[in-house]
Amino acid sequence: MKESVKLIAGNWKMNGLGASLAEVETLAAALAADRPDCRVALCPPATLIERMARLAGAGIEIGGQDCRAETHGAFTGDVSAAMLRDAGATLVVLGHSERRQGHGETDGLVARKAEAARAAGLAPIVCVGETLEQREAGRAVEVVRSQIMGSLPLALADGDFAVAYEPVWAIGTGLTPTLIQIEEVHRAVRAAMIERLGLGIAATPILYGGSVKPDNAAEILAVAEVGGALVGGASLKAADFLGIIRAT
């Protein structure tokens, strides 16, 4: 996942039924008519991956929202990386704060999942980010660096992945860090990535996530070391997502 252009990825979370695919058709048609200067990806619920992959065409990459570290087995309700790949996904979001907090996922588990994803031919988008308490204590950079060092397996040294910085306190709240704060953390993420995996990942994209909207996307995407965006609610509607895509 080398950064020749920015990556704008939409995370639908637990949203979307078959009827929602009309938004994907609208998005795909718009992108075909007006090719953007960025890569575009959508990560829907697992129930929509195969259908969305058929509709998306070449202009939209499809990803999963999580995967099991194991390749197969008695894990009721879980989905393996190979299953996502078989359904048409090429990416997978891992270590999102909602998984880390709500499901108790550790850095070590995220690293195992990332390694499984790469082995199955998926490019992981590994999420990191601090809570409001950690930010107010002045520990944002420390926390994110620790997550990078613990969540990125050495198998990612070929650079076929992305990191998404999502301050937990900004996700879905309408709050965003200042541009200076975003740049500070993204530079720290880059330094930690290079320390962990070497200079070969110097062009690997670092996405910003956390209340990215059409009206703030351009200024965020212009910040140094911001290689794209991981978008939540604004990716559910083609018009809103297109506004962010066109901000690149």
Image (tube, grey):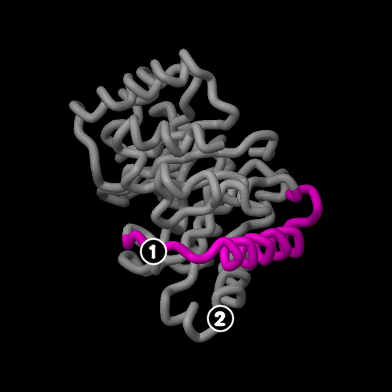
Magenta range is 173-202
Residue furthest to the right: 199
Q: Which residue is tagged 2?
A: 139
Determine the residue positioned at 39% across, 36% down.
241
Task: Find residue 131 and report its horizontal and vertical position in percent.
Answer: 43, 74
Q: Nearer the viewer, residue 64 or 139?
A: 139
Q: Which residue is tagged 1?
A: 175
Task: Find residue 37 and report its horizontal and vertical position in percent.
Answer: 59, 28
Task: Tell whether 55 sits left or right of 244.
Answer: left
The secondary structure that dominates the magenta segment is helix
Q: Earlier in the sequence, mark 1 or mark 2?
A: 2
CA gap between label 1 and label 2 equals 19 Å
Q: Amino acid at mark 2?
A: Arg
Residue furthest to the bottom: 137
Q: Secondary structure at mark 1?
A: loop
Residue 21 painted magenta: no
Determine the residue positioned at 63% across, 57% down.
153
Determine the residue positioned at 60% across, 77% down.
142
Residue 188 painted magenta: yes
Determine the residue positioned at 46% across, 26% down.
60
Q: Amino acid at mark 1?
A: Leu
